[in-house]
């Protein structure tokens, strides 16, 4: 079975409540458009030599903190209970 078939079958099973969406295992999709865009561009730049691994890590880390802060505000997380 090809990957596309697996994905299509999983989508159908998700609609029936039997599966979790693939994005649940993919943080760069779940953390919003800004994080996804930053993650994809940064990793492409690292792969092509435009950025170093250290620069990529720093950029992604900053964007991750921004995304986490936005979620904490949007969903009113009470971090005192963590």
Image: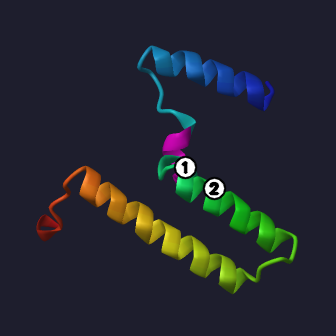
Pick out the residue farthest to the right: 48
**Which element type, helix, strand or loop, lies under badge 2?**
helix
Q: Identify the residue position indicated by label 2 in the image.
A: 37
Is 71 in front, or is 81?
71
The picture places residue 76, in percent across and down from the top left corner, at: 19, 54
- Residue 8 image point, x, y percent: 67, 20
- What residue lies at 45% left-to-right and 14% top-to-bottom? 16
Which type of secondary structure does the marked residue at label 1 adopt? helix
Q: Is residue 8 above or below residue 38?
A: above
Magenta stretch: give its range. Answer: 23-27
Q: Which residue is mark 1?
A: 33
Compared to residue 20, the image places residue 27 above or below, namely below
Q: Residue at x 20, y 57 (%)?
A: 77
Q: Quadrant of residue 5?
A: top right
C-beta proximity under 8 Å, tags 2 and 1: yes
* Picture residue at 58% right of the left edge, 71% below the top: 60
Residue 61 located within the stretch drawn in magenta: no
């Amino acid at each position: 079975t090809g990957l596309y078939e697996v994905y299509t079958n999983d989508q159908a099973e998700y609609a029936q409540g039997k599966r979790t969406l693939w994005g649940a295992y993919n943080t760069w999709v779940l953390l919003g458009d800004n994080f996804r865009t930053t993650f994809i561009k940064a990793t492409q730049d690292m792969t092509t030599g435009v950025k170093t691994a250290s620069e990529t890590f720093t950029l992604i880390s900053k964007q991750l903190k921004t995304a986490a802060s936005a979620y904490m505000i949007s969903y009113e997380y009470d971090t005192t209970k963590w």
